[in-house]
Image (cartoon, rainbow, N blue to C red):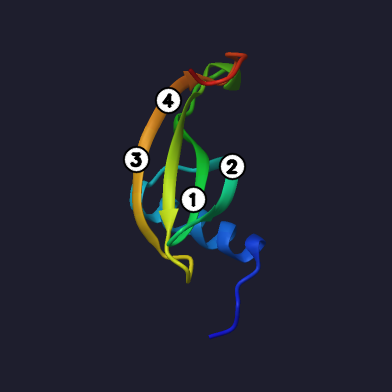
Amino acid sequence: MPRLRPVDLIEKGKGQLKELTGYPIDSVSEFGRVEDGWRMTITVVELSRIPPSTDVLAEYVVGLDRTGDIIDYRRGRRYFRDQVGEST
């Protein structure tokens, strides 16, 4: 099997998470190698509002195997789009 580039792994992970949760993807804030594959943090829009600054976002921590298939995920922090600062 040909080696996947990080950008391909990220796109594959984003597509799978959207399919699993039904939420639109907002961004990827973290991506890296772990012992058995890859780990990434993906931000999704769980609730779209007007104005968009009040959208409810959530960070999902996603584990990918070596081929880029999701093996686990969990929802982490939820927040409004206009909140500033690092996760706690």
- Name the N-terminal-most of marks 2 and 3: 2
| Relative depth, front residue between 35 and 79 | 35
Circle 1 residues within 10 Å: few <14, some 14–19, many ≥20: many
- Identity of the amino acid at label 1? Arg
| Residue ID for mark 2 | 30
Q: Earlier in the sequence, mark 2 or mark 4?
A: 2
Given residues 8 and 21, the one toward you in this image is 8
Mark nearest the camera among 1 and 3 is: 1
Q: Are marks 4 and 1 in contact (CB under 8 Å)?
A: no
Which-is-in-front pick, marks 4 and 1?
Answer: 1
Q: Residue at x 51, y 23 (%)?
A: 55
Q: Residue at x 58, y 22 (%)?
A: 52
Residue at 42% across / 25% down in the picture? 77
Q: CA distance from mark 3 to mark 4?
A: 10 Å
Against 13, is 55 above or below?
A: above
Type of the residue with mark 2: Glu
Q: Label 1 vs label 2: CA separation? A: 8 Å
Number of residues whose C-alpha sits closer than 10 Å to that of mark 2, classed few (under 14), some (14–19) or many (20 or more): few
C-alpha gap between disc 2 and disc 3:
14 Å
For this rendering, which residue is in front, 35 or 39? 35
**Residue named by callout 1:** 39
The answer to the question of whether label 1 and label 2 lie on touching residues, with beta carbons closer than 8 A, is yes
Which label belongs to residue 61? none
Residue 69: image quadrant is: bottom left
The percent position of residue 16, horizontal first and vertical second, equals: 43, 58
Q: Secondary structure at mark 4?
A: strand
User: Residue 15 vs residue 32: left or right?
Assistant: left
**Whole-percent x and y of residue 13?**
49, 57
Q: Which secondary structure, mark 3?
A: strand
Say the numbered circle drawn on residue 77: 4
Q: Which residue is mark 3?
A: 74
Cα distance in 3D space between marks 1 and 3: 12 Å
